[in-house]
Amino acid sequence: MANETQNRLERRGAVHRLLQDRDPNLLIVAGLGSAIWDAETAGETPLNLYLLGAMGCAVSTALGLATAQPEKRVIALVGDAELGMGLYALATVGWRKPENLTIVCLDNGRFGETGGQVSHSGVNLDLAGVATAAGIPTIRRVNDDAGVDELRSIIMDGPGPAFGLVEITADMPPVAMPIRNGAIALARFREALLGHDALKE
């Protein structure tokens, strides 16, 4: 649970460390808001799928992707408010248990995109506890570099499904807007994942 007295990581540095030496086949579904900017600055690639206008859908989208592409490793990179809008997806992940999926929640206990108001995880919502109750077998609470490194290893080598709660500060780094057109972004992702012929389907 978010707590102002806890040690917390700077968000962009934590995400960059998490994604350093990234496997070129790793797929990232980034949820609306700062998670997108963090993924973009960590290394622009067409295998990042940015959900620019679908708050609450990142985990369910990543679950579908992990199910459809079982040979790929998949990350759902989300903020605490994004995840809070789609909590039922955690129960589905715990039920289906895709071994290639990791949910990484960047928890600052704030609604960062609307002015930094305190969010539910800043008061009474323990997202790692919810993930545990949902039956996700591998849970990590991360607030230091060693924890980030361990989570990176879990992402690439399992066991999965996994849930990492990365406790970050409320500071908001500069926006790094990726491609804005959702249809083009999806077509780019599909082509990178499935090849040029996928666009003809």
Image: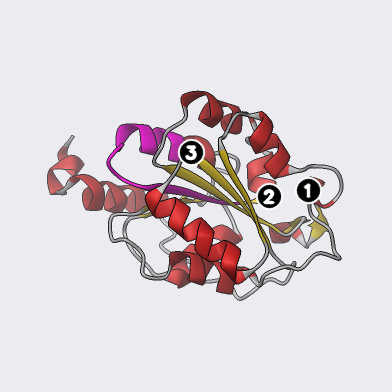
For label 2, the crowd category at 10 Å Cα-Cα, with few meaning under 14, some 14 to 19 and many 20 or more, is many
Instruction: Give how far across and how far down residue 102 sits, in percent.
Output: 48, 46
Q: Earlier in the sequence, mark 1 or mark 2?
A: 2
What's the magenta region? 61-78
Disc 3 versus disc 1: nearer the observer = 3
Residue annotated with mark 3: 161
Q: Which residue is the site of mark 2?
A: 80
Which quarter of the image is occupied by the C terminus?
A: top left
Residue for point 78% across, 50% down: 1
Q: Is residue 134 left or right of residue 53?
A: right
> Viewer-proximal residue, 41 or 104?
104
Q: Splitting the image into 4 quarters, where does residue 45 fall?
A: bottom left
Gap between marks 1 and 2 measured at Cα? 7 Å
Q: Are marks 1 and 2 in contact (CB under 8 Å)?
A: yes
**Which quadrant would residue 72 be assigned to in this image?**
top left
- Furthest-left residue in this view: 197
Q: Is residue 29 above or below residue 87?
A: below
Q: Is residue 72 magenta?
A: yes
Separation of residues labelled 3 and 1 (CA atoms): 22 Å
Amino acid type at mark 1: Ser
Q: Position of residue 125 (x, y in %)?
A: 79, 42
Depth order, front residue of 82/162: 162
Q: Nearer the viewer, residue 38 or 140?
A: 140
* Residue at (45% x, 43% y) in the render: 159
**Cβ–Cβ under 8 Å for marks 3 and 1:** no
Q: Is residue 49 magenta?
A: no
The amino acid marked with disc number 3 is Pro
Separation (CA) of disc 3 from disc 2:
18 Å
In the rendered structure, find residue 77 and report the number of the disc placed on it. Answer: none
User: Sequence order check: which comes first, mark 3 or mark 1?
Assistant: 1
Q: Disc 3 vs disc 2: which is toward the camera?
A: 3
